[in-house]
Image (cartoon, rainbow, N blue to C red):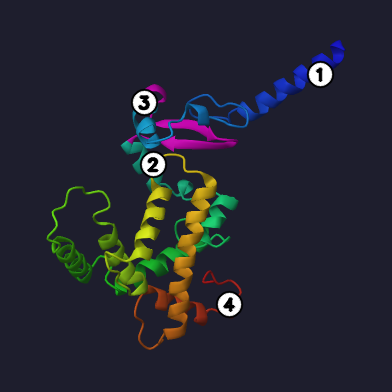
Amino acid sequence: TLKIYQYHVIVIYLAINWFTQKPKNFPPGPPMLPLIGSLPFMPRNLIHYTMAGEWRKKYGPVVGCSFGTSKMVAVCGPQEVLEVLRRDEFQGRPKGDFFKERSFNKYLGVFFSDGPFWVEQRRFTLRHLRDFGFGKKSMQDLILDESVVSCGNSVPIRTATGMFAVSTLNVLWGMLAGTRYSRDDAELKDLLEKLTKNFRSGIVGHTESMKNLRDMQNFFRKSIQNHKTTIDETYLRDFTDAYLKEMKIQQNNPDTTFT
């Protein structure tokens, strides 16, 4: 009986040590408990305020913590953030099912890819977005048009929350998909509400987050399908047309990143 007790104690000790041990040179941070990591020590809301304020004062500008069993490093200081953004060794992106679900179960696009794939996609995206006004005077004209519409309502504005959501989306979506939405569009309002929930500070439930994400993906799919049926390759209307044309050009290239 004593041996069994000792055995269980050793197993529990090793398990706790395995789940809570920190990698070499891991920065200081809040405690990490088995399985749940640092979650009990994180606020439900405004977590970035805690990292940039309380944790930065206590642990320094680089904080080590864990979300469940996944080790994370949070960079809080302004100079440290700039250094991270400028150095190539920090250009990698996390891998895992959670991140694949964001892009149709593949590592696609610019935000969740890295390496040569990211370089090619970023270069193509910036080049063609500029063709449709990104960073040019024509984009300023789009912003002014949306500002006129926003200010044209005779009802006084009482809160700034979400006031520019539709206007901002119209400017970006005009370049990406060539579409402008009414401020009263019910589908768009619902989509923006879900997008806001997913980006809101705090730990959003995985189930709700993924449901909102799938709804947004369906919205994008409808837009892409509409472009596929109406595209004229001699007259590209927007970034989606340009991307679909590039996909067709490279469809026989086994190493293409355009899929």
In this figure, which residue is indicated by the disc labeled 4? 253
Question: What residue is at 54 percent from the left and 71 percent from the top?
Answer: 259
Distance between the Cα atoms at labels 4 and 1? 58 Å
Measured from the top left, where is residue 193 in percent x and y?
A: 37, 54
In this figure, which residue is indicated by the disc labeled 1? 7
Going from N to C along the chain, the mark reached first, 2 or 4, is 2
Q: Secondary structure at mark 4?
A: loop
In the figure, is residue 106 to the left or right of 136? right
Residue type for callout 1: Tyr
Measured from the top left, where is residue 114 in percent x and y?
A: 50, 56
In this figure, which residue is indicated by the disc labeled 2? 201
Q: Is residue 63 in the magenta section?
A: yes
Residue type for callout 2: Ser
Residue type for callout 4: Asn
Q: Marks 1 and 2: which is nearer the front?
A: 2
Q: Secondary structure at mark 1?
A: helix
Distance between the Cα atoms at labels 2 and 4? 41 Å
Going from N to C along the chain, the mark reached first, 3 or 4, is 3
Write down the region rendered in magenta. 56-77
Q: Marks 2 and 4: which is nearer the front?
A: 2
Going from N to C along the chain, the mark reached first, 1 or 2, is 1
**Residue 51 in view, yes or no:** yes
In this figure, which residue is indicated by the disc labeled 3? 54
